Each structure stands twice: as C-alpha cells, then as structure tokens.
Image: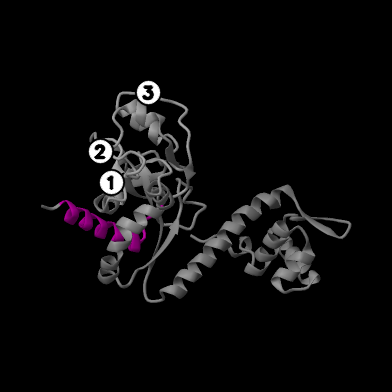
Amino acid sequence: MIAPRRFLPSISSLLALEAVDRLGSASAAAEELSLTQSAISRQLKTMEDQLGVQLIERNQMRLHLTPAAKDYVQTARSAVQNLAQAALRLKANPAGGSLDLSILPAFGMHWLAPRLQDFARRHPEVTVNLGTRLNPFNFASEPFDAAIHFGRQDWTGVYYLPIMREEVLPVCAPNLAPAGFDTLNILRAAPQLHLQSRPDAWERWFELQGQSVTGLHGMLFDQFSTMIQATIHGLGVALLPSYLVEDDLNAGRLIKAWHGPAISLGSYYLVWPNDRATPEPLRSFQEWLKAQLNTDIAP
C-alpha cells in the first residue's frame, strides 16, 4: 500500500532538497535546476509545511539541512534515482520489461556476450542492460536486478544459481620460460602478475600445490584483458582462467608455466536479492540460463 498523500512531497521539492544538500547552496541548486533562488526556497518551505518538520536551517542567507533532513535526503535521493532509472528502462523498452545485470568484464565478454543473442531471439520483450561491478554490492543501493559473481557463496542476502566452475592455469610468454618452470621454487621466484579483485589467488594456488607462501608481489591489474596482454609481452607469469587463454595457448602466444593439472579457485554464479519478488524478465533469464548450462554439458 502506498503511503498517504500527505507524506509524499512533490518531485520538484525533492529535487530542490537534494540539490541544496549536494551543492551546498540555494544559488547553486537554482542554477542546476534552472530556477530562481526564491523558487528553491518556496519548494523547501512547502515541503516543511507538508511534513510538519524543519528541514532547513537558515543562517546568514545560507541554507543548511538539519541533521534529520540529511538522513531523509539520502533515502529521497535513492528514490529519485530509482524513479529515473525506471523511466529510462520504460523509454528503452516500452513494449516489455528490462533486466539490469551486473557482469564481470572477462566473463561477460567471453562467455555471456556470445550467448546473449540467443536470449534476445527467444525473449524479444526483454531488454538486457549490462553494467560492470567487480565486487559484491548492496542491491538496495545499486540499479541492478541480478549480478554475475565469482568465488564462493559468500555474498549475503542473495540467491545463487551456479553457472560454471573456473579452472586456472599459470601461463607465461615462451621467451620467459621456453619449457615452463621446472620446480615450484623457480616459479615462485619469477615475476607474478596479480588481479586486483583476486589479490590472494597466487597464495591459494601455491597452497593447493602443497607450498605455503606469503608476501608475493608483482604488477597489479584491474582486468584480465590487460593482464593477458602483459603476459604475452613477457612481463611475468599470470594465473588465468583456462577458457580465457585457450586461443593464446593454441596459437603459441602463451605457454603453460607449470605442467600440473588445472586448479579451481572458485565458480561463477548468477545472484539476485532474496528480499524482493523476482521480476519476470529475471525469471526468463534464469530459465534461459539453465537451458544454456544443460546444453553446454550435454554430450
């Protein structure tokens, strides 16, 4: 049930309050909203009268939000942003729903993107909007219906749909170690390349090989794509998902730096919040994804 009308200020008043809080003055808020300062003041006074609460402290011609108003404006800002996002989704796809999906760059580019055309063909009523997030986030404050997550089931407040187990391989350029490294100690002494979102990957890999190591250092990258290029150009040894380097291994641009079996450090999941109803576009995507996974593992 929607709250009584008296508790719902106008959009104009909310925008004025948000702008004053963010910009720090009525003049700046007026300039951004193409209004006069007196119009901003009237909007704020109207909201105060409607809610019966003081929102603004007026001191030497400057406006300051009261502590209570500062708490209120955070929720109001999120509500206005959500309303704007909903309007954009409606404009982008007036005939059907939309799915806002957070993806991981490498997985999105190499695994998901080649398959999305099939989803679009099967569900033309759904518009898929993609955004990038590298780490878990709060669904209440981000404009996403679901996300692709890598690692363990350690994202709180969500449901999980397993997608695939990732296997990683140590790889390097042929000129760095033409036949790979003979021992783990030699490999450990080589320059290692690290991914920002997986800072302990090498330590975990060595531990699974039976060696406990700490304090490994080397170049740090925020995405696999740049780390792969650095590896090809001989800057170090990288621990990379096998599905990302298959072509480079076959073409001889990279070689296996260690000839042991591939090791898994985590899995990919589709996750979505467990405290709200599942929208129909997300339900369609889940069913399509399950069918894709069954197709991928079929003999």
Image location (x, y in percent) of residue 45: 76, 64
Residue under the image location 70 percent in, 52 percent down: 69
Residue under the image location 68 percent in, 59 percent down: 51
Between residues 150 and 156, which one lies in front from this camera angle? Answer: 150
Residue under the image location 49 percent in, 70 percent down: 88
Mark 3 surroundings within 10 Å by alpha-carbon count, few (fewer than 14), some (14 through 19), many (20 or more): few
Q: What stretch is highlighted in magenta?
A: 276-297
Mark 1 surroundings within 10 Å by alpha-carbon count, few (fewer than 14), some (14 through 19), many (20 or more): some
Q: Residue 242 carries which label?
A: 1
Between residues 170 and 44, which one lies in front from this camera angle? Answer: 170
Amino acid type shown at disc 3:
Ser
- Magenta stretch containing residue 147, yes or no? no
Q: Is residue 235 left or right of residue 249?
A: right
Marks 3/1: CA distance?
Answer: 23 Å
Q: What element carries label 2?
A: loop
Quadrant of residue 42 in the image? Answer: bottom right
Of the image marks 3 and 2, the number of the one nearer the N terminus: 3
Quadrant of residue 288 in the image? Answer: bottom left
Amino acid type shown at disc 2:
Ala
Q: What element carries label 1?
A: helix
- In the displayed image of the protein, which residue is found farthest to the left? 299
Of the image marks 3 and 1, the number of the one nearer the N terminus: 3
Q: In this view, does 168 lie to the left or right of 49?
A: left
Above-or-below relation of 58 to 169:
below
Of the image marks 1 and 2, the number of the one nearer the N terminus: 1
Labels 1 & 2 near each other (Cβ < 8 A): yes
Marks 3/2: CA distance?
Answer: 18 Å
The residue indicated by pointer 2 is: 262
Image location (x, y in percent) of residue 186: 36, 28
